[in-house]
Amino acid sequence: MANIKSQKKRIITAEKARMRNKAVRSELKTAVKGVRAAVDAKDVEAAQAAANKANRLLDKAASKGIIHKNQASNRKSGVQKLVNSIR
């Protein structure tokens, strides 16, 4: 454990950020799973709606620095390819 007051605060702050980032990443995975489930069910409208939601979450995570912007773009592309595969 750190002895310096500012370092103790930094440890607490970093833990809060880690937990927040973990929650956002989990939410992203859940959103992409929703797209996959809709694609498996061959439901085009639901798949597109789920893809739009996933894209929004990916953009938000990228803007907050939780994932890299190129990673967000790659995932958005993959999600849209899934949706387009059932059209």
Image: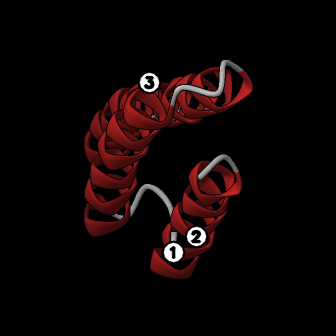
In the rendered structure, which disc, 3 or 2, sits on the residue that comes first in sequence? 3
- Whole-percent x, y for residue 34 in the image: 54, 23
- In this picture, is 67 found above or below 4? below
- Circle 1: element type: helix
Please name the residue shown 45% across and 26% down the image. 27
What separation in Å lies between label 3 and label 2 (alpha carbons)? 22 Å
Q: Which mark is residue 36?
A: none
Q: Which residue is mark 2?
A: 77
> In front: mark 1 or mark 2?
2
Q: Which mark is residue 73?
A: 1
Q: Amino acid at mark 3?
A: Ala
- In this picture, is 76 found above or below 31? below
Please name the residue shown 58% across and 70% down the image. 77
- Circle 3: element type: helix
Callout 1–callout 2 Cβ contact below 8 Å: yes
What separation in Å lies between label 1 and label 3 (alpha carbons)? 20 Å
The colouring scheme, among rainbow, by chain, secondary structure or one colour, is secondary structure
Q: Quadrant of the N terminus?
A: top right
Seen in the image, is 36 located left or right of residue 66? right
- In this picture, is 68 found above or below 15? below
- Whole-percent x, y for residue 76 in the image: 51, 63
Please name the residue shown 49% across and 36% down the image. 44
Query: Quick one: which residue is furthest to the bottom in this view?
Result: 70
Hey, which quadrant is residue 60 in on the image? Answer: bottom left
> In front: mark 3 or mark 2?
2
Q: Which mark is residue 23?
A: 3
- Whole-percent x, y for residue 32 in the image: 57, 36
Query: Quick one: which residue is furthest to the front in this view?
Result: 87
- Disc 3 residue crowd, few under 14, some 14–19, many 20+, Cα 10 Å: few
> In front: mark 1 or mark 3?
1
What separation in Å lies between label 1 and label 2 (alpha carbons)? 6 Å
